[in-house]
Amino acid sequence: MTTATSEITISDSAVKRIARILAKEPAGTALRISVSGGGCSGFQYGFDLDATRAPDDLVLERGGAMVLIDSVSVPFMDGSEIDFVDDLIGQSFQIKNPLATSSCGCGTSFAL
């Protein structure tokens, strides 16, 4: 099950992991996801903890998890799912982005 807002969803595993991280942070802290130019495929995702919310941020909240996405990054992530993967390679947040035409092996950069 996922939560949808502005065509961006958060998987159950991501909700649990984000909530666990934020439980150790000061009240009002959220996971901020951003898209910027760079990375090995053209664009890259940034993941930061942030207690500052801009008026035009997209705010996704569910089960103790709060994600902020700035208004410039939202169009690059339209239709995406924010996921948390724990496998043999390691643990990481991954963005499953249907707009990406290619991505790097690490999963943090992509091309449109």
Image (cartoon, grey):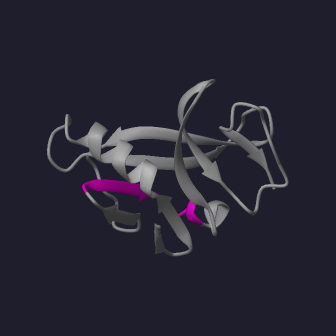
Query: Residue lying farthest front?
Result: 88
Which residue occupies the foreground of this view, 84 or 66?
84
Query: Residue lying farthest top?
Result: 89
Compared to 17, does 56 lie above or below? Answer: below
Give coordinates of residue 73: x percent, y percent.
57, 58
| Horizontal side, residue 57 vs residue 41: left or right | left
Quadrant that contains the C terminus: bottom right
Query: Residue lying farthest right?
Result: 101
- Is residue 111 within the magenta segment? no
Give coordinates of residue 101: x percent, y percent.
85, 54
Give coordinates of residue 37: x percent, y percent.
70, 43
| Horizontal side, residue 52 vs residue 71: left or right | left
Q: How many marks?
A: 0
- Is residue 71 within the magenta segment? yes
Residue at 54%, 67% in the rendered image: 8
Give coordinates of residue 93: x percent, y percent.
53, 40
Residue at 68%, 38% in the rendered image: 107
| Horizontal side, residue 96 vs residue 7: left or right | right
Residue at 71%, 40% in the rendered image: 109
Compared to 13, does 40 lie above or below? Answer: above
Quadrant position of residue 17: top left
Query: Residue lying farthest left?
Result: 27
Extent of the magenta region: 64-74
Compared to 1, does 64 lie above or below? Answer: above
Residue at 64%, 69% in the rendered image: 79
